[in-house]
Image (cartoon, grey):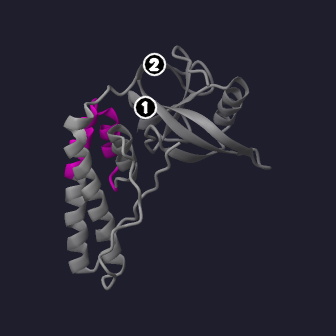
Amino acid sequence: MKILHDDLPLFPLNAVLFPQARMPLQVFEPRYPEMIERCLRDDLAIGIVLIKEGAEVGGAAIPHSVGTIARIIDSARQDDGRINITATGVTRFVLQKYSTARAYLSGHIRLLPDENVDLQKIAPLAQRVGELFFAYVRAIQNVSNPEADDQEPAIELPKDPTILSYANATTMPVSAQDKQNLLETVTVPARLRREILILDREIKLLRLSTEQNVNVRDIGAFSAN
């Protein structure tokens, strides 16, 4: 896969893709099938960026300045001209400037790789995120079925703290802007600390909703590549 640092094809969305996560997409607006066909033909990466201003359909949207390099791992053209693809996140990038010279947005970017972390120092943060994640899943189960036993969820979390931070961010029941803030968080420890605060808040809300018998949001999905 080739990453065009000076002319990266950009796909503005109302969603955030994190490294290591997968995202199914239905491509139908005329400019985007053209972009996808080019990327498939030339084995090019695409840049997934959250829309800051504008919409997915219509005029060119203004994207946020941090996005995720993505690899197209699956594609299928439909009879009506739409293309269904699956993209998997590779690494973050900073969008330094973008161009509307083509039918679709493209950008001049620099990669934003994750720094190496001291596993021993970061272990307590990663452990706490894992504990709160399982507590969050149990809280959802208790809301769905208050009579169910308080069993440990049958989920295996990534052991690598960096991948864990992205896996957890992917499943976070928060707004796209909150996810963007997590994506833009430079260091892994800082991202894990933010996630601890969010999970703690969401667990408290779920427990409150159990008492008040109100609906809760579903947990998201994460797939490592």
Q: Is residue 117 above or below residue 124?
A: above
Residue 131, given in percent of the width and then of the height, sits at 25, 57
Residue, disc 1: 67
Dot 2 amino acid type? Ile
- Image-based side of 146 in relation to 125, left or right: right
The answer to whether residue 186 is magenta is yes
Residue 165, given in percent of the width and then of the height, sits at 33, 43
Q: Is residue 84 above or below residue 200?
A: above
Q: Nearer the viewer, residue 27 or 138?
A: 138
State if disc 2 and disc 1 touch (CB < 8 Å): yes
Residue, disc 2: 109
Q: Nearer the viewer, residue 120 or 11?
A: 120
On the question of residue 95 being in view, the answer is no
Dot 1 amino acid type? Gly
The answer to whether residue 52 is magenta is no
Q: Residue furthest top?
A: 6
Neighbor class of circle 2 (other Cα within 10 Å; few <14, some 14-19, many 20+) is: many
Q: Which residues are magenta?
A: 173-197
Q: Is residue 116 above or below residue 162?
A: above
